Amino acid sequence: MVRKRQTSILGLVTLLSLTGYSCSLPFFDKNGDFGWSGGGAGKANQANSARLSGVINLGEGCKAGYFQIKLYGLFEGGSNQVEAQSDQNGRFNIVAPPGQYMIQVQKDGCGTKETIELEESTEHMIALSVSEIRPMVRMGDPEARLPASVLVPFGKR
């Protein structure tokens, strides 16, 4: 009986000491900062994020409503993508990592695309003008071919 208690107490002491040791080790998130990737580091990253607020101005043929807004990261931030929706009046607020983005706004055949650069820990304001998106119309016969003189390059003689 005494031996079983000593074994269980020894096991408990060992478990507590291992737990204490493992909690004292520093953990690094993907940016190399101290912290848990889902805990305190998330708050720190949000503090460094850029804020984008704006309004959508309606062009001819576009109606007010909830526009879909997408930010697509460019260059180094190519994997970043943020989506949001405007309110009924066309106002929106977005929090995103700093970097260069293409912003796309669209709803019911109206939209626009622009590029924007968001800086760290900064609030940006933008006004986007949307217009009716018209499909491209091809002129002439789609089966027509270019004359051979256009297709064959000719050099110096």
Image (cartoon, rainbow, N blue to C red):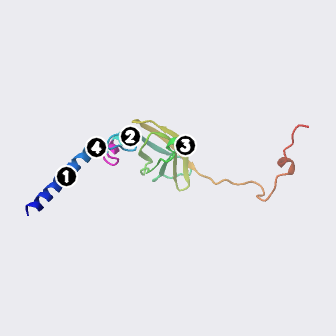
Q: Which corner quadrant of the image does residue 93 belong to?
A: top left
Disc 1 and disc 2 in contact, CB within 8 angstroms: no
Which amino acid, by three-letter code, is at mark 1? Thr
Q: Nearer the viewer, mark 1 or mark 2?
A: 1
Which amino acid, by three-letter code, is at mark 4? Leu
In the image, residue 144 lies at what x, y percent? 80, 57
Residue 111, labelled with which disc? none
Residue under the image location 19 percent in, 51 percent down = 16
In the image, residue 118 lies at what x, y percent? 46, 38
Q: Earlier in the sequence, mark 3 or mark 1?
A: 1
Disc 3 and disc 1 in contact, CB within 8 angstroms: no
Tag 4 secondary structure: loop
* Distance from Cα at disc 2 to Cα at disc 3: 33 Å
Q: Nearer the viewer, mark 1 or mark 4?
A: 1
Residue under the image location 88 percent in, 37 percent down = 156
Residue occupied by mark 4: 25
Residue under the image location 23 percent in, 50 percent down = 18
Q: Which corner quadrant of the image does residue 125 belong to?
A: top left
Q: Nearer the viewer, mark 2 or mark 4?
A: 4
Residue occupied by mark 1: 14
Tag 3 secondary structure: strand
* Distance from Cα at disc 1 to Cα at disc 4: 17 Å
Q: Which residue occupies the foreground of this view, 78 or 113?
A: 78
Q: Which corner quadrant of the image does residue 30 belong to?
A: top left
Tag 2 secondary structure: loop
Which amino acid, by three-letter code, is at mark 2? Gly
Q: Earlier in the sequence, mark 1 or mark 2?
A: 1
Residue occupied by mark 2: 32
Q: Is residue 144 left or right of residue 26?
A: right
